[in-house]
Amino acid sequence: MSRNRIAAILSALAVLAAARAVADLDGSYVLPQDDWAIQYATRPLADPVTMLQQKIRRGEAKLKYDPDYGYLPSVLSNLQAPVSSQVLVFSKTSFQAARISPRVPRALYFNDRVSVGWVKGGDVVEIASMDPRQGVIFYTVDQEESSSPKIVRRDECLQCHASGATLGVPGMVVRSVYPDVSGMPLFHVGTFITDHRMQNLITRVGWETRMALESQKAMNQALKRPADEVSDSTTRRINSAADALVAYMLFTDEAPLDGRIAGASGFAEEFVRQGPRDRQGRSLRQFDLTRRIFRYPCSYLIYSEAFDRLPDAARDRIYRSLWDVLADRDHGRAFASLSSSDRQAILEILLDTKPGLPGYWKRSSSFGGVASEAASRPRSEQE
């Protein structure tokens, strides 16, 4: 087969894969974990559990056994998952299902980068840990007391945690079920996936972009094109994924709250204290909890390492699209729920608190100034 024929086939396959992937961005298409650009099972990791394991090996950290809770308190402390984040799950929806019931719920604890699961009398502590490149990595810690407890990677968790429910990448899933009196899910009645799945979408955009660029690289080699040439189809694939993330970051489809949400654990106050604040004291982690979840409708995960480590092509598109919306240039129906005051507040907060913003964000610190500056710049620079 001729080189040109091979290149044509590669090109057609790349376009087909891009179209399918983008069409299923919120559907059931599961991305290949063994793709050369991904290699989920073998690439080096930088998630919190991997960092903890390195500290343990250096003697800088230790897992201590508690006679009542096993290694749970030590795991929570080392991974900085607050006890106040505790959520109790009464349904049998874990590989420790036999131990879970309405009388013995599964406890979940979390922060921005890890989730920890524990069942009274359970065999293991379960950990889901967010790697900034690879997505969520799954681990367990055996609950038997040991002088050298081991944290073991458990990719079998992907049976539930890599599906359409997680946007086709290894990720978190919050699923509501109808249980019977024992806690067994009544799957024939139906289940519901609960948003927001922001972490999974960041992973999905990163994977889509790296796979698209790797396919482009192979195509360029086959056709003897310049190594940095990017086709329109590759650009569309990256931009479509990035724009979906922007829409999600700004909570465009968020359901309004019918009444006030309140808690008693102190988690809300602890959560808010973690966020960077602008010169007016505002933070993207501040809650509203009356008409919507957050006071300022832009995801605080824009500060995450996973966001910062997105491929340049995706992150550049995200910043451009986000700026267009916040500078009041994009009045599309998708962003109709964002008021001018919301856009201005989010823009001002990010200008004060987000390192690494492109230069065109920083040329003006006022909402009107940004909008008027955009109108005065040459179209080539705006694009």
Image (cartoon, helix red, strand yellow):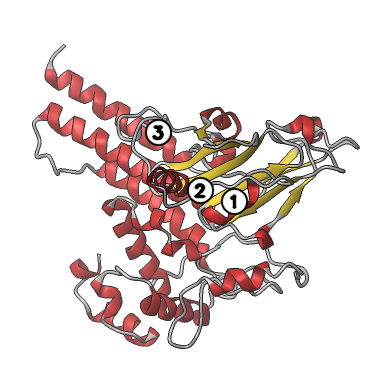
Amino acid type, label 3: Tyr
Amino acid type, label 2: Lys
Amino acid type, label 1: Ser
352 is higher (above) or lower (below) than 173:
below
Give coordinates of residue 305: x percent, y percent: 39, 57
Disc 2, disc 1: CB below 8 Å? Answer: yes
The residue depicted at 27 percent of the width and 69 percent of the height is 358
Q: 152 left or right of 120?
A: left
Give coordinates of residue 65: x percent, y percent: 63, 45
Q: 122 left or right of 370?
A: right
Give coordinates of residue 236: x percent, y percent: 32, 46
In the image as oriented, which residue stretches furthest toward the right?
Answer: 181
Can the viewer see residue 138?
yes
Q: Quadrant location of the C terminus?
A: bottom left
Which numbered tag is attached to residue 62? 2
Provide the residue designation for mark 1: 74
Q: Quadrant of residue 268?
A: bottom right
Element under disc 3: loop
User: Of discs 2 and 3, which sits in the foreground?
Assistant: 2
For the residues marked 2 and 3, what is the alpha-carbon distance in whole angstroms?
27 Å
Q: 376 left or right of 44?
A: left
| Mark positioned earlier in the residue sequence (2 or 3) | 3
Provide the residue designation for mark 3: 40
Element under disc 2: loop
Element under disc 1: helix
Q: Residues within 10 Å of mark 3 (few under 14, many from 20)?
A: many
The residue depicted at 22 percent of the width and 36 percent of the height is 216
